Amino acid sequence: MKKIICAVFLIGLAVCMSTCSYDTPMELDIQVSNPSNKARIAQTVVINLKECLPRTDLRGLTATMSYGEKDVIVQIDDLDHDGSGDELTFTTDLVPHEQKKFHIDFSYEKATETPTSKVNAYIKLNDIKGQHPKVQSITYPGNANLLDMYNSIYGHGAVFENEYMAYRIYMDNRQSIDIYGKTTPQLEMETTGFYTTEEQMNEGYGCDILWAGKSVGAGSFRGIYNDEPCYIDSVNERKQSIIASGPIRTIVEVADNGWLYNGRKVNMTQRYSLYAGRREIMVEVIIDGAPEGEQFYTGIQKLENNNSGFILDEILTGNLCGSWGSNIPDKSKPHLSENVGLGLYVNPENCVSMHEDSLNYLVRLRTDNKNCIRYFVATCAGRETNGFKNAEQWFNYLTEWQEEMAQPCIVELLH
């Protein structure tokens, strides 16, 4: 018997629904289907373990996966910090209309081999001896000095990367997403830490490629005040955490507890997920205490020089905007101009309207009936050796990306 788990959401997130058996299986067979006439690269699949294995103790659970005789790298993550695995995730390539069947074996035995990670995430302290020790999570009181917070973390906030791009989220009231572009696909943050030297650039390393200024940058989340984007001010505490760091997915969580917004205090959690082989970050924002339909902003900035951009408001296929242009990310080095491509896809349920101002292509957001907002941010660097070289190429990619989001793969549980 075959039961549909659900259509893979947008880039491939599958949630195992209550159709799963209430036996206690220590193995699962699933099928992933590509319904479209275009290939899917690094299609992501996520299985909700607490619903698929409802009577199993998930503490210490490990898994191995196979496709035929080939092993598949999987990752189990504890999202709610209760010591039990919540989600199993993996990626796969599919040709048009292909179906693939996978077998998963679960065990409590410690894995004998650790696969090489294709992603990386960290928070490092900016200590007086320059050792930059890593921490899993860091919390500041709401009245902490913003500049002190910003400067107390090496890189000014949580950093995460895959082979294409790296990102950091500033630890202050802006919580802006900054981006780092790579020349060659590889992991670089343990070497450059977002602060590439001239020597490293000559060796082929990438660098910080975006100057956000007062814009929303690359999909930064904002409140609304007087119909304009506003920062996340007046909170009880701010927190950043590394929830997952490989081998195929990173998850960075940003929490603002007791945020005074529109006259009421809410608890907001932003979760940023990045997969190996993908260009986009998935952003999930949960706002506990907000009324249904509460509104906020996100968007992408217009580049400083030679900006091209568009807004495409499509109810059925999702809401998309894109920009391409050049800028000087480090104003002390005006000779280093970087070409950048930005894209934003918003879950149709969360999109109120789209418009542009002098700095941005803006999307007005609303929460759904679960007080959640979901959108995706895609980026590219003109410096990529085999990447996009002009606005036309980048915008063509974004429209194909939108089509992929609108026609997700399907994941089924096989019995």
Image (tube, rainbow, N blue to C red):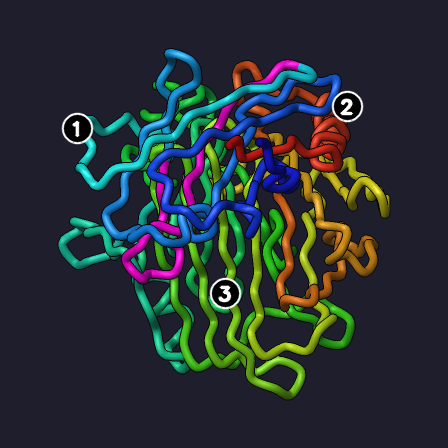
Q: Which is more N-terminal, label 2 or label 3?
A: 3
Q: What element carries label 3?
A: strand
Q: What element carries label 2?
A: helix
Residue 60 shows in this picture: yes
Q: Which is more N-terminal, label 1 or label 3?
A: 1
Give x and y (percent) for residue 171. 42, 62
- Tell us which disc is closer to us: 2 or 1: 1
Q: Which is more N-terminal, label 1 or label 2?
A: 1
- Which residues are drawn in magenta? 75-95
Seen from the viewer's position, the closer of residues 405 and 195 is 405
Residue type (three-letter) at the residue carrying disc 3 = Thr
Q: Do labels 3 and 2 touch, CB within 8 Å?
A: no
- For the N terminus, which image quadrant? top right
Q: What residue is rendered at 67% in x and 83% in y?
A: 262
- Left or right of 349 in this view: 415: left
The alpha-carbon separation of the residues under discs 3 and 2 comes to 36 Å
Residue type (three-letter) at the residue carrying disc 2 = Glu
Q: Does the magenta stretch include residue 122?
A: no
Seen from the viewer's position, the closer of residues 64 and 385 is 64
Q: Do labels 3 and 1 touch, CB within 8 Å?
A: no
- Left or right of 309 in this view: 413: left
The alpha-carbon separation of the residues under discs 2 and 1 comes to 47 Å
Residue highlighted by disc 2: 392
Residue highlighted by disc 3: 269
Q: What residue is rendered at 63% in x and 45% in y?
A: 376
